[in-house]
Amino acid sequence: MFSFFKKKPPTPQAPNPAVEIPTTVTSALPVADAAPKPPMPTGGSLIGSALVIPIAIPEPGAIAPERQKWVDKLRLSLGKTASSISVVFGGSLIDEALYENLEDALLMADAGVPATQYLLAELRRKVNDSGITHPVALKNVLVALVTQMLQPLQKSLVIGQYKPTVIMVAGVNGAGKTTSIGKLTHHLSTSGASVLLAAADTFRAAAREQLSIWADRNTVEIISQQGGDPAAVSFDAVSAGRARGKDVVLIDTAGRLPTQLHLMEELKKIKRVIQKTGDGGSTETGVTPNLPPHEILLVIDGNTGTERRRPGQEL
């Protein structure tokens, strides 16, 4: 009964000086005998008595596609949003229908209600003042307004002013804090900075193990305790980072909602305990106060919109 799966002897063929393939191979592109052929892949499927293995044979002179860069992937993912806004300006008139469609497109792109209202009001004002009549010119005005709104929010992450630079990561449940720490650790490590991770999320199950995986992938050290106090873990991590000469200490905290007051108080406690590892500086000598955490990153879901922590806002 297993004779069906037995491989039949191949049909005698003329010898090929480049590659000799003893099985039936399907390909949509013809290949010259003189051209080098790719190596035989390992995977395949059994159809009848022949092993059919799909091979992608490049055309002569074709270059294999390189791995997409992160910026290219981001540009591709935002293509739908860009096209939905660009199609609004595809007409020939600037009328109320254009403004209504633009409002819908901005809200669907998660621009937020206040930002959308501001942009529409500014567009109407500039159209009345400058006498713009073509939608393409209005689109250029929109691009300039959005750029003007985003430039004040641009802020560099300064590493090296304090050693170690303590970065505390907070946010709601499931927003991606630990994953963001893993990506940030990879970026800092490849940039030449030494990183120490602190597993201060002692509430969620397997949070310590998840952060340990990121530490192993990036070959960095981690400070963790089984069921320890989050503030104590953070204090030990900052102290260890200073003693070991680390450039950055990343502190992972447990996810929490702002309505959970007892958890918000715990977050404040972590911040107070961390500050005990620093110093207040001196006004006489001009020494800048060193009170960690030096940066607090708030990780939120993309659907949250324009919510963000204002500079200097207390937790």
Image: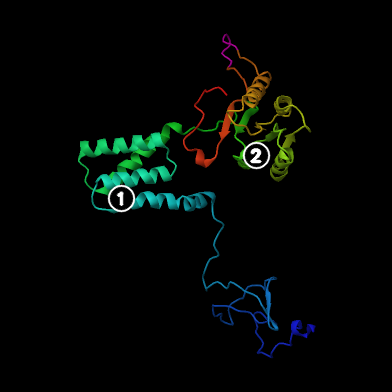
Q: How is the image coloured?
A: rainbow
Give yes or no for residue 100 being in the magenta stretch.
Answer: no
User: How much space separates mark 1 and mark 2, taking CA atoms?
Assistant: 41 Å
* Vertical comparison of 8 with 250: above or below: below
Badge 2: residue crowd in 10 Å (few <14, some 14–19, many ≥20): many
The residue furthest left is 131
Quarter of the rendering occupied by the N terminus: bottom right
Left or right of residue 139: residue 28: right
Where does residue 111 sit, x and y in percent of width and height? 42, 40
> Can residue 24 be seen by looking at this rendering?
yes
The magenta stretch is 282-287
Where does residue 79 sit, x and y in percent of width and height? 44, 52
At x 37% / y 45%, what residue is drawn? 104
Residue of label 1: 89
**Residue 131, quarter of the rendered image:** top left
**Disc with the residue nearer the chain's start (1 vs 2):** 1
At x 69% / y 33%, what residue is drawn? 201
Q: Secondary structure at mark 2?
A: helix
Q: Secondary structure at mark 1?
A: helix
At x 67% / y 71%, what residue is drawn? 41
Where does residue 294 sit, x and y in percent of width and height? 59, 25
Instruction: Identify the main secondary structure in magenta.
Output: loop
Where does residue 55 sit, x and y in percent of width and height? 61, 73
Q: Nearer the viewer, residue 250 or 254?
A: 254
**Residue 238, quarter of the rendered image:** top right
Identify residue type, mark 2.
Thr
Identify residue type, mark 1.
Phe
Badge 1: residue crowd in 10 Å (few <14, some 14–19, many ≥20): many
Residue of label 2: 178
